[in-house]
Structures are given as C-alpha cells and as structure tokens.
Image (cartoon, rainbow, N blue to C red):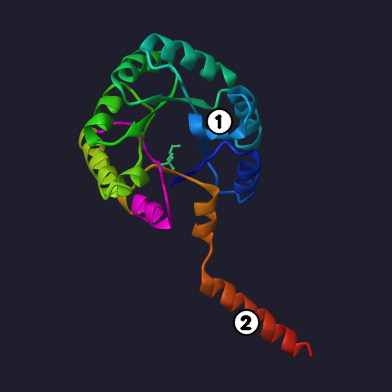
Amino acid sequence: MKLFLDTADIDEIREGASLGVVDGVTTNPSLIAKTGRTLEEVAREICEIVDGPLSLEVISAEADGMIEEARSLAAIHKNVVVKIPMIREGLKALNVISQEGIRVNVTLIFSPLQALLAAKNGAAYVSPFVGRLDDIATDGMNLVAEIIEVFDAYGFDTEVLVASVRHPMHILQAAQLGADVVTIPLKVLEQMLKHPLTDIGLEKFMADWRKSQG
Ligand code: G3P
C-alpha cells in the first residue's frame, strides 16, 4: 500500500518525509489556500522534499479551462498528477488530457459508478472521500469495497486512492480491502505509529536498566 500525505504544509511534509514511509502528496484548493502561498511555489517546494506523485487540483469548472490548467500544472514537475473533480465537465476534460499522457486523479468520488466512469476515461487514480461519507452516517469504506470490486471485475489499471481519511481504522480497512493508496493527514500518520503499550514497555525497559546501573 502506498501512503500519501494529504497536506500542502511544508513543515508537515518535511516531518512526514523524514519517517521514510511517505510515497507521495495530495493537495486540494482548501489545503493550498491555507498556506497563503501560490500553488506553483508550494508545488515546487513539495517536489524537492518528496520524490513521488503530487496531486494538484484545477480550479476551472469548465472542460476547456480544466484542460488548459491541467497542461500548465503538469508542466510544473514530472511528478505532478492533475486533480479533476468528478463532474460532467471534469469527465470531458479527463477524456482529452488522459490521452495526452497527463496523469489524472479524479477527486470528490462518492459512488462506484462515478469511479467506473473515471476509470473508463483513463484516470490514473480515483479518490473516494470516505470521511465525508462517514460524516453523514454513510459507510465510506463500503464505497471503497464497491469500487475495488468493479475495478477487479474489469481489470482497470486505475488506482484506488482512499481520501478524506479521519483515523487509523480507515487505513487498516483500506489495507484489508487492498486499496492501492491512502492519503492521510500527518496527525493520522503519527497515530498509526503510536501504541500506549509500546511506550509503557519502553519506559519499563529503561527504568529497569537505570536501576541495574545503580
Ligand atoms: O484532499 C482530499 C481529501 O483527502 C480531503 O478530505 O474530508 O479531510 O477535507 P477532507
């Protein structure tokens, strides 16, 4: 399973990358806006820290504008993956740019049929938003299971990139389902690695060692 960081915060990306388990980064307009910097500035800095796929989202709502933006975003760096929302105009734009060799992450996926359409048009990734479904009392991980079932049935190469992850259980369930990627906030990555019994056990080892040293 690939782990991407879901942030545009450079300090968080540096910290996550230092752990050695980060394979890429995803951003969205909200995350970029929080930085107070231009998308290009942030993108170039991220590419210097993490040598893996970096998702940058278009702003345009029309296919022509999305296509123009996608070409510009892809030109920033070889690692850039263009994020396009799963709307009618986004499907039209995907149909064009996926044939130009630009990798596309189709985002804001909330149904397996949306994922199917994106895969048919050559998306490199689909991003089902599990947390936002959980937030409205709908089983977000069930969407991931349905997408994987459909993709496996037809042998689509499109990767399932589980997004809107709220806690480590989302990661475990995604891994058990065989999702290709999860994109997670740094806080959730830190929750992944921590266990209270590990901390308690290490403290006991150190205390016993200190006692033995007088
Ligand atoms: O960046 C895409 C997605 O992971 C954002 O999810 O629900 O935490 O805003 P959310």
Residue 163 drawn in magenta:
yes
Q: Residues within 10 Å of mark 1 (few under 14, many from 20)?
A: few
- Residues in magenta? 155-175
Expressed as whole percent of the image width and height from the top left, the position of residue 133 reads 30, 44
Label 2 beta carbon less than 8 Å to ligand 1: no
* Disc on res. 204: 2
Residue 168 drawn in magenta:
yes
Q: Residues within 10 Å of mark 2 (few under 14, many from 20)?
A: few
Expressed as whole percent of the image width and height from the top left, the position of residue 196 reads 53, 71
Where 5 sits versus 154, above or below?
A: below
Q: In the picture provided, is 4 more to the left or to the right than 64?
A: right
Where 34 sits versus 197, above or below?
A: above
Name the kind of residue labelled 2 in the image.
Lys
Helix or strand or loop: what does disc 2 sit on? helix
Residue placed under numbered mark 1 in the picture: 33
Name the kind of residue labelled 1 in the image.
Ala
- The reply to whether residue 27 is in sight is no
Where 185 sits versus 73, above or below?
A: below
- Residue at 64% in and 48% down: 15
Q: In the picture provided, is 2 more to the left or to the right than 205?
A: left
**From the viewer's perspective, is the residue at label 1 or at label 2 nearer?**
1
- Mark 1 or mark 2: name the one nearer the start of the chain: 1
- Residue at 49% in and 53% down: 188
Expressed as whole percent of the image width and height from the top left, the position of residue 42 reads 62, 29
- Viewer-proximal residue among 90 and 75: 90
- Residue at 35% in and 43% down: 132
- State the residue lying farthest toward the right: 214
Q: Quadrant of residue 41?
A: top right
- The reply to whether residue 204 is in sight is yes
